[in-house]
Structure formats: C-alpha cells, structure tokens
Image (cartoon, rainbow, N blue to C red):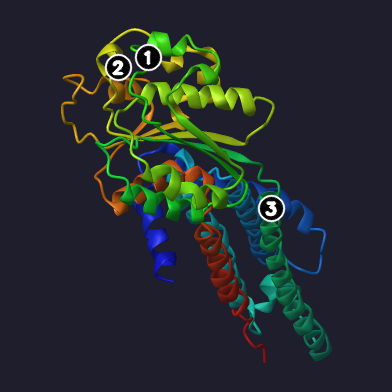
Amino acid sequence: MEQFFNDFGKYCTEASYDSFWFWGIPMVTVLGIWLLTTIGLKIFRLRKKLKTAFLVNKAWIICSSIAAGTIVAIICYRWSQNLFAAASKDYRLSWLIALIVTLTIPILAFCNLRRYYYRDGIKEVTDQPTTKLQFEAVVPLIRNAYENIKWFYLIPLFGFLFLLFQINKGTNLISVVYDNSTSMIGNNAIDALSETFSSLEDNNEIILTTFNGLSEGKTNIKEIMSVKQSSKLKAGNVALYGSPKNAMNSLATQLSEESPNSPIAESIWKTWLVINENKANQTYKNKLMVIVTDGDDPICSTLQSGGFFFDDTKFIEYFTPENMFVIDYSGGNKLQFCDNNYFIQRFENAGCNIFAAENSKESYLDALDEALQAFKNNLNLIFWTIFIVALFSIIALLIPPKKIN
C-alpha cells in the first residue's frame, strides 16, 4: 500500500507541468465531452416525455462516461505497450487528471438533476401533472429515467478490456556488458543484477558479456570495428540466455571472475557481432544495451576523435543512442590510460543515457531500474486507474433523486 501511494507521488514529481500537452490532454477531454454532449442532445431529444433540463444533464452524464471509457482504454493500452515507461511517463498524471475530470462531470450533473425532484420542480423535467392520477404516473417515470442513466457507468469498465493487449507483449532483448576488471568491485553488481533479473518477465532474453582476462587486445576503435566475425575477437565472454531466470542462475559464476584489464570497446563490439550472427532473424519489440563500467579502457586515449560505434549503419539501426545506457562508475576521475574519460564522453556526445553511480547495491539498483524501466510494467498505474473509476463511480451511484411527496 505504501508503494501504491509512493508511485502517485512519483507521477506528480515526474510530471511535465510546463508542457502544453500535460494540460492539453485534460482540456481536449473537456472539449471532447462538450462536442459529444452537443451531438448527443439531438439524439436524446427524441424522447418527448422528458424536457430539456433532464436531457441536458443526461447527455453530460452519458458523454462523460463514454469519455471516461476512452481514457481508461488509452491508459490500459499505453500501459500494456510500456509506452508510459520512457518519455510518456511525464504524462501519467495528466491522463489520470483527465480521467478524474470525466468522472467528476457526471457527479455534478446528478447533483444538478436531483434538484428538480420535488413536486413543483417536476415541470422542469417533464410535463406538469394536473391530476393526482397523472402525478402518480409521472413520478415513477422520472425516477426510473434517473436510475436508468446509472447503467451507463458500465461504459468505463469496457476500457479495461484493452489490458488484453498485454497478452501480445512480444520479446525484448536486454544486453548487459559488465566490466569485471580489477578496478571494479563485483559483489554489489551481482546482487543488484540478480534482483533486477528476478523482477523481469520471461519474455526478456538476456545477453551478458564480461571480459575474459585478455592481456593483449586491439589498439584502437578503428581496428576493432574492422572485425566482422565475433570469433576473430578474443576479448569478451558473451553468454546468451533465453530468460532472466537462466541469466540470474549464471550471474555469480560469470561475474565473480575478475579480468586484469578492461577491453570494454572490444567486448561491446563482440557483443554486437554475436547478436548479429545469432539474432539477426529474430524480431524484438524492444532492444537495449546496458554498459556497466568505469571507462578504464586501454584504448581510451584513441577515442578522443575519429570513428565510433554509431558510425556503423547496422549498429545504430539496431542499438540507437536512446537504447544505449551507460552506468558510469568513474566518479569523474582521471583514468590510467587517458587524462579524460573519452570512452564515457563519446557515448554522452552521441546522446546515450549516462547514469553516474557509486559502488553500492542501491546505486546499482537505481541505475538498472532507470535503464530497464521500458521492460517492466508497474501495475500501480492500473490500480490507480481502477481506484479512481471505482471511487468516483460509487459517489455518483450513491446520489439518489429526492423523494417526491
């Protein structure tokens, strides 16, 4: 329950309040309800026994329920496709506000409508009864008409059917290149990666790359990228796992072995070659590479200028800069092989996600969670949607018409 409310706080802190679309979504929702109501009035006027006052409020209630169902459907669909995981996460609160607006309008309409439910107010919603017999016939008519409107509160529930899109969620490819050199301490990473993998669903394939203790690797990035077969690169121990569970079971073994040096660039390129050789014919919904390193590569000084991974057309098509995430443990320090960390800098200049971290389990978890958020669905957004629909629906359904004597 604490996490349920904490996540709502996260929606508020991460919201793009200065964005046009943040406020545009609720405004467009209100405009849409108004347009639907205007059109709906022409349809509802076919019932001649009920007057304009009743029909206007009924139209607001029905059209708002339709809008609520649409908002619920949009939230559920976007959640099922993990569209709230990246940039769209800034608009989670906006969609919830739009949903609250659609469910508040019917409450106001019910409160306004029940004002006419007294002996003298009947004439505002239907023809004024002139005899006792007419009065006894009109009262059940308008009471039933009031209660029948509440059936339209079933419409928002149909929006939850869009959660079925979660069934066709496709397969994701997560490639982790981990620097297991002596300059990195591995225990925290093993614990954090194990915890992260345990939270991933089985539709995620894992590729885990560590260094294999190579004492002499390639001397510059151009030489590395000229290699087109993974078997011709000695650096990089690349392991393919069909599920996060399999990867988790092998973490301790693969990450516990330390490498005396840091052929990072060579290991990344070998990972790409292995993927190209083994996964070229497979279609993935999402592809991500996470690089955990302090950037201490022997070829670091050669990376100040010249070519880089993203100059390769196939590489950048497969792993765009937006899908590359570097967890930086350099702490901004000068490295053994260069005065500046050109390795990290080149990734940053290309537009990759850089996360400056410290060597602790919590820091690893924060960084990995940030990198893998597009692969993990947080059910609390759906629970908040259900909570809002249920709460406002109950309030509206508990507003009865006044008793007419």
- Residue 130 appears in the rendering: no
Residue beneath the point at 63% across and 28% down: 278
Q: Nearer the viewer, residue 102 or 69?
A: 69
* Badge 2 vs badge 1, beta-carbon distance below 8 Å: yes
Residue labelled with disc 1: 218
Residue lying at 37% horizontally and 20% vertically, measured from the top left: 350
Labelled disc at residue 191: none
Q: Which of marks 2 and 1 is in front?
A: 1
As drawn, 219 above or below 99: above
Q: Is mark 1 on a helix, strand or loop?
A: loop
Quarter-of-image position of residue 296: top left
Q: For marks 2 and 1, give the CA distance.
A: 8 Å
Discs 1/3, front:
1
Which residue shows up at 68% across the image and 56% down it?
159
First in residue order: circle 2 vs circle 1 = 1
Specify the label residue 162 is tagged with.
3
* Mark 1 neighbour density, 10 Å: few (under 14) some (14–19) many (20 or more): some
Q: In which quarter of the image is residue 211?
A: top left
User: Mark 3, residues whose alpha carbon is within 10 Å: few (<14), some, or many (≥20)?
Assistant: some
Q: What residue type is labelled 2?
A: Ile
The reply to whether dot 3 and dot 2 touch (C-beta < 8 Å) is no
| Label 2 residue SS | loop
Q: Pointer 2: what residue?
A: 299
Name the kind of residue labelled 1 in the image.
Lys
- Pick whichever of labels 3 and 2 is earlier in the sequence: 3
| Quarter of the image where the N terminus is located | bottom left
Residue at 29 percent across and 23 percent down: it is: 297
Q: Is residue 345 visible?
A: yes
